[in-house]
Structures are given as structure tokens and as C-alpha cells.
């Protein structure tokens, strides 16, 4: 088979079977679409063909338009005329077409199926229109045909959430006409096609159906409600509105008018930065598992079957939960029976929560729980493939544990620490096992947060990095492999985040206004001060000290966090921090914070001419806080802490909640232009030089060089090679 193509075969009784072929997911590359068009035209014209079945190769129908093409061509890379002609040939060509669907029918794949005159699928198939998660909208007629098949409300929900439906739900909704076993898929689809051709079954053309559409006033209410909901959820996003505009035109003026509007709306969405950002994140997230010098050198990963977790606290029990959920046997070790029981109870509670939320059955939760055993000894440690230590951040305690582990574990067992602040080399300093010691930095809650930061030292073996990557995939995390430095990649890049916000408060801005700008207008899940309350001001101060030691040239020490510590306003855990918290953990503004803010401002005495608080715009606030984060990201790239710049984008999205629709921290800077980021940082460095804070903003070498060379920050090594 050569490249993306469609294959035409004539089967018995005059049924032409066209098979989409483009492994691994039969993505609709323009070449495949062209080939599909040629096959369809041939089948439609052939005297020997009575009916047509479209199916996919390798047990999958299609994952939709080839997303890689979006990165290569402007305007979405979709040829409208091919698309129009193709769907017309499928839907109302002389011979009926039926889709035989297995595995997935997503995006354009689902839309080709929607244009068919009937659809048959196998159990386990997922169908949906997830285009909005890529910053576009369905562009092969999905905005018109889906509402006509499943009803307007359900169609809006499916498109706005990007969530596919199961085969069973699709049958109930009328999205498919039959669900049949794998062995019968093709024969049933062929029979349905012949039944239509012979007039035994009515030939339905989805675009012209109106039976599932509500009367116009009701339809408009549904669309307007969906628009309002979508604005409330993500006011920054335009493409959901464009999608609903296309739906609106279709229900008000008919499917053909709707198709024209859909194409216009698609082209507009495809031209926006949101689309570029989301496509970037789609590929970047899948690329984190490919690490130079580790995954490309012929080594085979060893899956983890049994794991020991040391420490049953919040992190340890979360790690254990994530592992038992995917079938790994877990041995949890604690120092006494009471702590052990508390750890096991936490795992039980985590699983119970999942059952309550409908994420798993009680039977599956029971089976998962049966995979955990508790111990106070090291006796069974000789049996495990991997150990993850998750005790408190105490260097000598961790060193003792690793010395013990070296003695009790198999010589090939992976020894991991979940530290977030301690140098991995120091943790293993008293052992001779440095080649199998690695950081496995989880984010809290460990069984929920999707990122696993894998920290390798200069001594960690490739095999151990590969195995830990494999473990990350096993527990369904997105792994990012990083180097060993203060804060590793994620926390290090984000240390200027709260720092910049504190500096703004000391300059006169209201902390609650800053939080609103960063959360509601920029799109972070919460602002820096709400985040500080979640993490705890005590932890903030402790971590701040380690950054001050490591990077004294660029740390601003505000009295704000110290003031909170002195007043025992540590955040959620003490009921008050920047905010005060009611019994439902709801954060409300607290006037009692003001004296702490005033004291911090008096101590800071920062006043920069031209940078008065009252003159700062939303854009100023956002850039003042995030450009130093970008700058630190540049240093991390230059030092080779990350394998590739896009890893930082993924990490910032998955661990810090940086908006995916902005592409992650480095992609966002590139979309704004590195030169612009550089210019603003340099200006602030000059402005703040008189108060001794130039270092907080001074553009990094990597940023300087990228600008000088006119290359993107995301270019990585290409920039470094020009340094
Ligand atoms: C005009 C139209 O309306 C526009 C469109 O159709 S836009 C496309 C809409 N479709 C989508 O958004 C589906 C995107 N894909 C997915 O959700 C998931 O990849 C999936 C459910 C199909 C498979 O998931 P999973 O089994 O976990 O495998 P996953 O690693 O994600 O994908 C396997 C490979 O296929 C690639 N791939 C998946 N969907 C693709 C697509 N639509 N185009 C190009 N490549 C795709 C992935 O990049 C990955 O490549 P890699 O192995 O080189 O990293």
C-alpha cells in the first residue's frame, strides 16, 4: 500500500466496497479524500454497481481529517470543492451508500458516515465530532447533518463538548441504524445498501431531513442558550460561536445554506491562533513519549507489574490509586499500623469517589483494591519491579530510605522518588545505585492530574528512563522527561508566576483584580493568589527560599507571603489566606487582608514612573506576570532540561492549567512573537534597574539569540546552535 488511499472492490450482488486506508487511524489526508472521490465517482458511474459501502482498514473507520495537514497549509488545508462534491456523491449520487463503521468515526470520518444513507457499526465503536477541541468546527457538513440525525440539543452538546458517544448511545440517538458484531459488519452493511437500492428500505438523505429538528423558535432558544453557556465557560473562544452560527443558519434557512455558512465559519476558525495553539498541543502531547537517545536506540521497555509505594500520605495513596486502577500490584509501606491504615483508607476513598462519579463499577473498584497490600517491613520489596518513595521532603530521611532500598530491592528494580524540591543526585548520594534512581514527580491529586514529570540525572540509565516512561503510559499519564535542577522543569518555569503577581501588588494593584484578570480574562483555572491559598503560604515561603538560593539574580522577595505566614493565614488549610474560606471551601474576598498588603507595600516602596497601578491594562498585567515565566522557560530549554520546547507547553497546560487554547507557555510566546516578548522584558528590566530588580526581567540568552536569529522559541536546538 502506498500512502493514504481508498481501495475499491466489487463484491457479490453489485455492492462496491470502498476501504479507507491510512494507518494508524485512517486520517483523511487530501490524497485519501481525492482517492475516495475517484472511487466513489467510478462506483457511481459503473453499471455493475448497485450500491456502495464505505469502510475503514485495520478495524478503524476514520479519526477524521488529517490534523498534520493543518500545520502545513493555511486556511485549514481543506479543499471545499472536493469536499462538497464528495459529500454530494455519497449522499445523493445515483447509488445509495452505507457506512460500515468499526472502532472510531471521528470528525471528518464521522461526517462522511453522516452523509451516507445509513450507518452500521460494531459494539465498542466511538462516534463524534471533536473538531472544537482543535479550535475549528466540523467542516464536512457535520454542523448540518448531526442535528438532523440526533436532534439539535444533543448535536450542540456533542460538538461543544467534543465528546464522542458509544455505539449503544449512537443507536439510541439514531446516529447509527444498527450495531452488529465485528464478523457481521460488512455483510449487514452490504445487505442494508442492497435493501435501499432495491427499494425495500427508504433511502434517507440526512441533509434534507427535518423530522428531528424542533420548530424554529424552540431551535433558536436552544442555540442561544448553547451560545450563552459557551461564552460563560470560555469567553475567550470564538470558534464555538462560529460553530453555532453555522448550526443556526442551517435550521433557519435549510441544510444547503447551512453548508455554505459552515465553510465560511470553518475558514474563519482555521485562521485563528486558537486553532494553531490547539493543534500544536495535540501533537506536542503525543510527542512527549518520544525522547532523543532513549526511545530511539532500540531498547525495549519493561512494563511495571508490581510497585512498592513508600508513604501512604496524599501523594503516596494517589500514586497507589493510579497504579492499581490499571492492574499493577501495589505494596504500600508505612512506618506504623495507624499511618498504614490511613493510607489504605485513602486509596479506598479515591476508588469510592470514582464509583460515585460513575467512572468505574463497584466490581472494578473492589478488584482494584484487592491489588493493594500494606506492610511495615521491607521483606517483600525483593519482589517489586519499581519503588516510588513519597515521604515528606526531608533529605536525610530520603537518603536513609534509598540506602535501604539498595539493599532490599532486586538489582534491576527502578528506584524513584516523588520529591518536588530535592536534588535527585542528593537523594541517591549514599547509594551505589545512581543509574537506577530517577524522579517521578506527580502533581496532586496524583491519581487525577494528567502529568508525570520524569526527572533523570546525568547518571540515570536510558533503560530506567524508558521503563519509567512506560510506567507513565501504563498509568495513563502524559510523561515529560526533564533534567535535574531546582524545581525541575514545571515548578521552576512557574516560580516567577506568583512572584510577578506579588510585585504587582507591592506596586499598588489589588490582588483580587489580578486573580480575576488571570483566571477570567486570560483563562487560567485560578489566579496566582487563589493558587497560593490552595498550595499553602508556608509551602510558598519554603519553596521561595530554595529559588532565592538557586537564582538570587532574578528572585523578588515580597513581604506578602511572609506577612501571611506571620498571621497564620496559610490558605485553605487554615481557613484564610489571601481569601477566606467557608465550610464548602468557597473562596471569598477578605478585607482583613488589607493590613498585610499595606505592610508589604510599605516595606517594598516600589514606584516606577510610567508603570502606575492605575494605568496598567489587562494585557499589561498578563504579560508582566507571564513573560518572566516565558523567560525562565527559555533558560530551561537552553540548559537542555527539557528534551524539546514543546514539552514545556504540554507541562504548562497539564500541570499548571495554562490554557491549552493558548498553546502552552512557549507556543503562546511564539504566537505573540519572541521579539515582542523580548522588547517588553527589556523595557521592564530597564525600568526596574533603579530599584535593583532588573534581573527579574532581563531577557535570557536564549530569548536574545532567538530574536536576533529571527527564529521561534519553539525551534529549540536550532536556536541553541546559533548561540
Ligand atoms: C473537516 C473536519 O471536520 C475536520 C476534522 O476532521 S479534524 C479531526 C477531528 N478528529 C479528531 O480530533 C480525532 C483526533 N484523534 C484522537 O482523538 C485520537 O488520536 C484517537 C481517539 C483517534 C486515537 O487515540 P489513541 O489510540 O490514544 O492514539 P493516539 O496516540 O492519540 O493516536 C495515534 C496516532 O494517530 C495520530 N492521529 C490521531 N488522529 C489523527 C488525525 N485526525 N490526523 C492525523 N493524525 C492523527 C496521532 O497523532 C498518533 O500519531 P503518533 O503515533 O505518531 O503520535
Image (cartoon, rainbow, N blue to C red):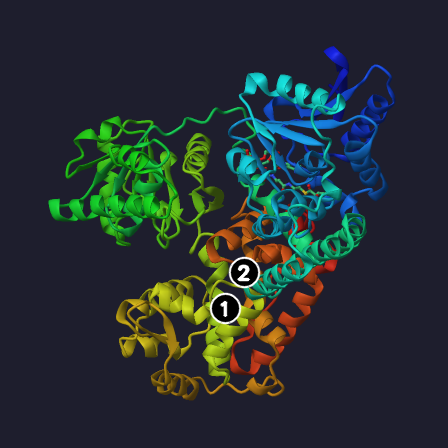
- Whether residue 246 sits left or right of residue 305 in the image: it is right
Q: Is residue 200 above or below residue 372?
A: above
Residue 578 disc label: none
Q: In this view, does 236 lie above or below 183?
A: below
Q: Where is residue 393 in the image (x, y as percent from the top left)?
A: 28, 54
Residue 572 sits in quarter: bottom left
Disc on the earlier residue, 1 or 2: 1
- Whether residue 443 sits left or right of residue 219 in the image: it is left
Q: Which of marks 1 and 2 is in front?
A: 2
Q: Where is residue 452 in the image (x, y as percent from the top left)?
A: 43, 45
- Whether residue 155 sits left or right of residue 94 in the image: it is left
**Which image quadrant: the N terminus?**
top right
Q: Where is residue 186 in the image (x, y as percent from the top left)?
A: 64, 19
* Distance in Å between CA atoms under marks 1 and 2: 10 Å
Q: Marks 1 and 2: CB-CB under 8 Å?
A: yes
Q: Name the residue under label 2.
A: 632
Residue 723 visible to the viewer: no
Q: Is residue 437 above or below residue 191?
A: below
Tell me which residue sits at (24%, 48%) in the image: 346
Q: Name the residue under label 1.
A: 554
The response on whether ligand 1 sits within 8 Å of label 1 is no
Amino acid at each position: 500500500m502506498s500512502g493514504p488511499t481508498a481501495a475499491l472492490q466489487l463484491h457479490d450482488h453489485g455492492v462496491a466496497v470502498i476501504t479507507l486506508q491510512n494507518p494508524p487511524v485512517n486520517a483523511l489526508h487530501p490524497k485519501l479524500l481525492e482517492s475516495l472521490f475517484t472511487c466513489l465517482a467510478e462506483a457511481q458511474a459503473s453499471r455493475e454497481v448497485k450500491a456502495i459501502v464505505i469502510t475503514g482498514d485495520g478495524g478503524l473507520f476514520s479519526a477524521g481529517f488529517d490534523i498534520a495537514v493543518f500545520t502545513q497549509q493555511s486556511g485549514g488545508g481543506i479543499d471545499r470543492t472536493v469536499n462538497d462534491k464528495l459529500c454530494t456523491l455519497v449522499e445523493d449520487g445515483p447509488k445509495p451508500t452505507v457506512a460500515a463503521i468499526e472502532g472510531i468515526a471521528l470528525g471528518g470520518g464521522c461526517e462522511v458516515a453522516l452523509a451516507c444513507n445509513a450507518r452500521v457499526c460494531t459494539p465498542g465503536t466511538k462516534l463524534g465530532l471533536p473538531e472544537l477541541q482543535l479550535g475549528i468546527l466540523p467542516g464536512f457538513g457535520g454542523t448540518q447533518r448531526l442535528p438532523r440525525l440526533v436532534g439539535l440539543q444533543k448535536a450542540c452538546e456533542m460538538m461543544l463538548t467534543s465528546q464522542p458517544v458509544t455505539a449503544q448511545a449512537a443507536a439510541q440517538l439514531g446516529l447509527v441504524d444498527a450495531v452488529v458484531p465485528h464478523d457481521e459488519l460488512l455483510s449487514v452493511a452490504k445487505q442494508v445498501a442492497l435493501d435501499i437500492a432495491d427499494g425495500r428500505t427508504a433511502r434517507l438523505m440526512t441533509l434534507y431531513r427535518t423530522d428531528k429538528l424542533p420548530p424554529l423558535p424552540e431551535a433558536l432558544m436552544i442555540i442561544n442558550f448553547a451560545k450563552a453557556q459557551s461564552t460563560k465557560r470560555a469567553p475567550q473562544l470564538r470558534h464555538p460561536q462560529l460553530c453555532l452560527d453555522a448550526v443556526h443558519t442551517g435550521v433557519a434557512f435549510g441544510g444547503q445554506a447551512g453548508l455554505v455558512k459552515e465553510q465560511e465559519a470553518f475558514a474563519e476558525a482555521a485562521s485563528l491562533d486558537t486553532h494553531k495553539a490547539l493543534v500544536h498541543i495535540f501533537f506536542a502531547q503525543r510527542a512527549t513519549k518520544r525522547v532523543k537517545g532513549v526511545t530511539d536506540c532500540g531498547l525495549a521497555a519493561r512494563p511495571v507489574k508490581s510497585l512498592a509505594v513508600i508513604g501512604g500520605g496524599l501523594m503516596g495513596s494517589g500514586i497507589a490509586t493510579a497504579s492499581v486502577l490499571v492492574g499493577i500490584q501495589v505494596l504500600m509501606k508505612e512506618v506504623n499500623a495507624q499511618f498504614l491504615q490511613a493510607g489504605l483508607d485513602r486509596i479506598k476513598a479515591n476508588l469510592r469517589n470514582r464509583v460515585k462519579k460513575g467512572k468505574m463499577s463497584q466490581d472494578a473498584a473492589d478488584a482494584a483494591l484487592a491489588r493493594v497490600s500494606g506492610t511495615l517491613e521491607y521483606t517483600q520489596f525483593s519482589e517489586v519491579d519499581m519503588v516510588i518513595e513519597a515521604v515528606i521532603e526531608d533529605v536525610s530521611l530520603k537518603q536513609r530510605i534509598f540506602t535501604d532500598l539498595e539493599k532490599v530491592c532486586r538489582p534491576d528494580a527502578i528506584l524513584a522518588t516523588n520529591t518536588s524540591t530535592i536534588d535527585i543526585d542528593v537523594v541517591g548520594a549514599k547509594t551505589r545505585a545512581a543509574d537506577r534512581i530517577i524522579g517521578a514527580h506527580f502533581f496532586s491529586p496524583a491519581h487525577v492530574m494528567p502529568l508525570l514529570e520524569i526527572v533523570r540525572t546525568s547518571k540515570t540509565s536510558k533503560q530506567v528512563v524508558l521503563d519509567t516512561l512506560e510506567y507513565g503510559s501504563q498509568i495513563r499519564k502524559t510523561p515529560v522527561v526533564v533534567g535535574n535542577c531546582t524545581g525541575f522543569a514545571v515548578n521552576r518555569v512557574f516560580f516567577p508566576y506568583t512572584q510577578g503577581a506579588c510585585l504587582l501588588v507591592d506596586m499598588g494593584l489589588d490582588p483580587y483584580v489580578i486573580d480575576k484578570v488571570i483566571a477570567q480574562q486570560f483563562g487560567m483555572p485560578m489566579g496566582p493568589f487563589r493558587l497560593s491559598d490552595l498550595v499553602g503560604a508556608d509551602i510558598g515561603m519554603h519553596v521561595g527560599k530554595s529559588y532565592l538560593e538557586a537564582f538570587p539574580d532574578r528572585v523578588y522577595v515580597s513581604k506578602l507571603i511572609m506577612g501571611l505566614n506571620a498571621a497564620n493565614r496559610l490558605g485553605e488549610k487554615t481557613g484564610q489566606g489571601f481569601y477566606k474560606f467557608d465550610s464548602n471551601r468557597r473562596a471569598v474576598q477578605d478585607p482583613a487582608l488589607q493590613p498585610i498588603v499595606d505592610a508589604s507595600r510599605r516595606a517594598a516602596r516600589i514606584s516606577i514612573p510610567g508603570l502606575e497601578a492605575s494605568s496598567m491594562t489587562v494585557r499589561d498585567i498578563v504579560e508582566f506576570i507571564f513573560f518572566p515565566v516565558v523567560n525562565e522557560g527559555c533558560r530551561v530549554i537552553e540548559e537542555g532540561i527539557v528534551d524539546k520546547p514543546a514539552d514545556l507547553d504540554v507541562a504548562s497546560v497539564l500541570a499548571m492549567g495554562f490554557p491549552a487554547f493558548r498553546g502552552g507557555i512557549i507556543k503562546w510566546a511564539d504566537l505573540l512573537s519572541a521579539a515582542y516578548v523580548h522588547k517588553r522584558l527589556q523595557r521592564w528590566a530597564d525600568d526596574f534597574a533603579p530599584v535593583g530588580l532588573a534581573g527579574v526581567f532581563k531577557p535570557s540568552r536564549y530569548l536574545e539569540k532567538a530574536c536576533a536569529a529571527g527564529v521561534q522559541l519553539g525551534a529549540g536546538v536550532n536556536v541553541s546552535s546559533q548561540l
